[in-house]
Structure formats: structure tokens, C-alpha cells
Amino acid sequence: MSLMARIETAIREVLQQQQLSKAPPKLAESLDYALFPGGARIRPTICMSVAMACGDDQPKLTNAASIALELIHCASLVHDDLPCFDDANIRRGKPSLHKAFDESLAVLAGDSLIVMAFETLAKIILQDPNRGTQLLLTLAKRTGVPFGICAGQAWETEDHINLSAYHQAKTGSLFVAATQMGAIAAGQDAEPWFELGARIGEAFQVADDLHDAVLCEEELGKPAGQDDLHGRPNAVTELGVQGAIQRLTDILAGAISSIPSCPGEAQLAKIVRSYAEKLTPVTPTQSTYTFAKMPTTFRTRSQNLSSIVNP
Amino acid sequence: MSLMARIETAIREVLQQQQLSKAPPKLAESLDYALFPGGARIRPTICMSVAMACGDDQPKLTNAASIALELIHCASLVHDDLPCFDDANIRRGKPSLHKAFDESLAVLAGDSLIVMAFETLAKIILQDPNRGTQLLLTLAKRTGVPFGICAGQAWETEDHINLSAYHQAKTGSLFVAATQMGAIAAGQDAEPWFELGARIGEAFQVADDLHDAVLCEEELGKPAGQDDLHGRPNAVTELGVQGAIQRLTDILAGAISSIPSCPGEAQLAKIVRSYAEKLTPVTPTQSTYTFAKMPTTFRTRSQNLSSIVNP
């Protein structure tokens, strides 16, 4: 079974176990809407890839860890799209959840997905209490306060942003969770896997900044120019398009070299390199860009990849 | 140490462990604002009372279970007060969280509290993996879909409400969690404790209906007449004030008689009876009430008790 098929099957299994036929119908429908069709499922893909590189000796733990991560990611997208945050009308090319249903259902769907993520891990604890507990604590740390995505989003409400804490928490935390939870599920120490997750997170942040700055809403599948609109820090504003592309290349090289020694190290490096190639725009020889005059090669590749960067 | 002191100390300990000094300052402040000063802390009080009636042989588990419950309850209050739900300006006699901060912080504070609740339980799992897992699964079941408070709140968005599922999920679920988690923390089976939690939940629903229908905003410490305003089912609308009071008395009698056999059964019955007396308004001999002409005895007692019913 391909990684993607394994992920989709595992998400469907989790939803089936929820007895959604007994839930309020609109809430049940909104949960399905938030989860399907998915984007590139990057976080669970990374989690599973790391677990497989480490032996994947308990596939049920790997599946639970990967799906719990995706549930938290989807919850964060639903809440971040709300009018009090990004006020986004579209997500993954269809109406955002609060537009398709309403705001109250978007709040409740997000809440329910967070609960479901922890419930998914709780169900596998007794199979291996040590690994199960570490998985729970890692997911909680990378979701809540002070280091998780909730804290990352909250930095945006501050007058004085701690930029490093902001980036690490907002984009980096679920990638760190992905690599560390993959390692934990396969019985490895989490700590050596921090750097890989953090670097992948940085790379995605820069790639997301590039996309946010240069693509239109239709190409992105969500509103464009949000960073500029909300005055958020953005690598393109800071470094220019070429500088941001160079930064992305450097980060991804660092990510590959940070992979800890493990049985599937070479294969994992190949997977990360493949992501790196997809994320890094083809750069023509011109050295000056304006947003109004983006190179066609970048625009074309970026369109295909918009679902990978922030699905 | 009194029960209330034990609860407050345990909540403070949980917050201290969160390293809030590293979080975005407004989010950290909003979490404190959501938790302190607390209301009557009924759910953790019930949870601890049941655990103590069953021997309380692992007080750390009892504390974690009780505080996790209170964190979920506070999260639900913060989210329920949002403009897309009750649009409540006050809570516990002070501005609701989204009024004191803003809507985005209210969403994030609620999310963070949910995560913190599961993290609190995750931290004690290895002390007793069996009990810890049951605590996690019970909290998740009574918080998420299809039987938890998220589902309960979502029933209000449906055109056709399943009234029984609605009441059980919206008000009953965290009381069922309270009795069951108290029993689990002390090593007892959860199932026999369902009925006590469900009946206490019913009683609080009727008491809340009475308060919502007959008290003013100042007396309640939150907006009054919300059920009528939002077209929600209410026992007073259905049975009248006297009928609702009779129903409350009957439910509480049933709650006491449902207490499972345990070492502290008599003491627990005394505690529930004491709540019952506080919840049940003094009824004068007149048989007819109008909301505009409430008996003074009811109004006076109710003012003192408003923080108990829905703090």
C-alpha cells in the first residue's frame, strides 16, 4: 500500500470509529468536510516516513500518530480561516468550513477534531504505554502553549512579536511533532529528530511566504497576499524573491544533513530531497523580480505545488 | 485541606507547569482570565468527592482527572460565549473573554485549554496506564463527538433537535465524566457511576433553566433569557416554574438513590443532598408564578446560588 493510501485508509478508520451517525448531522458532515478531500497530507507523510526509516515495528502506533497530527492540522486550518483570524472564504479550492456551514459549526468542528486527535492516541496507549504517553505529550506540546500552534497563532495578536518563537510555534511545531512522533512510534528517542522537523518547518514557512506573496487566490486555493494584508512577517518582504529562494535551498540542504542515523536513512534522505525539489522554484538567470513580473517557470511549478505547501 | 483548596492548588500547579512565561503574553493572560477566579468548581468537586468515596488511593490521578474536567468546562464557557454562539458580554460577573481580549484570543484560549486538559491526563498515565487510559478515553468521549459537549452545542444548530441527545450531551456529559472519572481515578468501574452523573446533569439543566428564565443579568453574572432568545428548549417553558421545581426535586432524589455501593457512600449522599438543597428554590404555598412576579424567597436564594448552577 502506498503511503497516501495508508494515510487515507487510517483517517477513514478513525472517522468510522467515531459513530458519527449518532452526532448532530451538520457537525458530522462538517468533520468530513474538514478532512476530505485532503491536501498533500504532508505531516502524516513525514511522520510515517520517519517511522518507516526507523523500522515501523508497531504500525498501529505509527498510523495513530500520523492521523492525530493530521486531525490537529485540519482543526488549525478550520479555526485559522475564521473571520476573527484570516477571514478566508476558500480553502483547498472550496468554500472554507465557516462559509460552507457557519461560524459556530467551524468552532465546534475544530474543537471536535482536537479532541479526536487525542482520543486517537489514547486508544493505542495500552499497546505500548511508554511510546503512547510520549506520543500524547509530544502532540500536546506542539499544539498548545507555550510552544505549539495555538501559541504560534497567538503571537500574531501581540504588538511585539518574538519572531523566532512565532515561526517555530506557528509552522515549525507540527513538523517537529511529525518527525519526533514518527521516531517515537518506532521506539526511537525523539530528541535527535527535532532538527529535521524544525528545518522542514522553516522550509515550508519560506515556501509558503513565496507562494503567499506571488500567487493569486485561484492558484493558491485560498486567499493570496494574506501576510501583507495582516502585516505578518514574510521572508519575501525581508529577502526578496531570489533571496527567499536561496534561503529555501540552504534550509533544505541542512534538513537532509540533519537526518539521524537509522536503518532507512538513505531512503528518508531521498524522500526529503524529493520534497525539496518540489518546493524549490526553478530560478532563471535574471536576478531581479517584481511580484507583477514573476518568471513563468516559477508560476507554473508553483501552481502545481500550491497544495503541497499549505494544503 | 478542603476540597476547594485542593482544587485551586491543583489548577495553579497545572498552570505553573505550562511555562506560560514563554507563551505570547496576551494568550497567557487570557488563560489565567478563563480559569480564575473560578465559579463553584462543581465538576471537579463531584469528581473528587466520588474518588474520595471510593478510597482516593492515587490522589495525583484524582487531581489530574478533576482539573482536566475543569479545563474542558472553562474552554466550553469561553467558546460558548463567542458572538457566533451566545454572544455573551459577561461571564462570572466580569466581561466574557472575547470582550476582555478579543475573539481570536478567545478561540485560541479555548483551544489551548482543551489541549491542556488532555496533556494534564497524559502526564499521569505512566503512574497507572490502565486508569490513565480510561480517564483519557472518558474525557474525550464526554467532550467530543458524538456524545460530548461539542456535540451537545452542535445540536442547537440543527433544525430538528434530538432533545434527549441534546440534553445528555450538552449539560449531562461533563457530569457523567465527573462521576465516572472520579471512580476510575480510584480504581473502580466507571459504568455504575453513569446514572449519578446523568441525574446530577439533568438537575443542573433544570436549575439552569429556572435561573435563565427568572433571573436578571446582574443576578446571573451572565446574560439572562438566553434560552428564550435563542429558541432553546427550557424546562420552565415546558412545565412552568412550579413544575420545573418539582422535577428538580424528583431528579435529585433519584440521583442520591443511584449512588453505587462504596466505602464513602453515606458521605457522598450527604454531599449530593447538600447540593440538592442549594439548587432547589424555597417554594411558597402559592401555586401560580409569573416571571414578573417571582417569590422573594426564590429570588434571594437564587442570587446566592447563581454561581453554583452555571459558574
Image: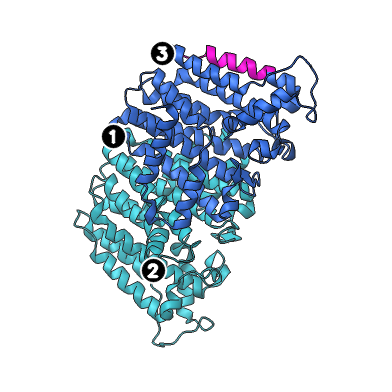
Chain colours: A blue, B cyan
Comparing A108 with B36, the one in front is: A108
Tell me which chain the residue with mark 1 is part of.
A
Please count the marks in the image. Answer: 3
Marker disc for residue A262: 3
- Number of the front mark, 2 or 1: 1
Looking at marks 1 and 3 on the same chain, the residue that comes earlier in the sequence is marked by 1
Compared with residue B285, is residue A286 higher up or lower down, i.e. above or below? Answer: above
Circle 2 sits in a helix, a strand or a loop, which is it? Answer: helix
- Local crowd size for mark 1, using a 10 Å CA cut-off: few (<14), some (14–19), many (≥20): some
Q: Give the residue number, with chain letter if any, for mark 2.
A: B278
- Local crowd size for mark 3, using a 10 Å CA cut-off: few (<14), some (14–19), many (≥20): some
Q: Give the residue number, with chain letter if any, for mark 1.
A: A126
Circle 3 sits in a helix, a strand or a loop, which is it? Answer: loop
Question: Looking at the picture, which amino acid does disc 1 mark?
Answer: Leu
Q: Is residue B203 left or right of residue A255?
A: left
State the residue at coordinates (78%, 29%). Answer: A291
Q: Is residue B126 left or right of residue B295?
A: left
Q: Is residue B36 visible?
A: no
* Residue span colored magenta: A246-260
Q: Main secondary structure of the magenta part?
A: helix
Q: Is residue B297 visible?
A: yes
Comparing A16 with B125, the one in front is: A16
Question: Looking at the picture, which amino acid does disc 2 mark?
Answer: Lys
Residue A202 percent location from the top left of the image: 60, 24
Q: Is residue A94 left or right of residue A44?
A: right
State the residue at coordinates (60%, 38%). Answer: A153
Q: Are marks 1 and 3 in contact (CB under 8 Å)?
A: no
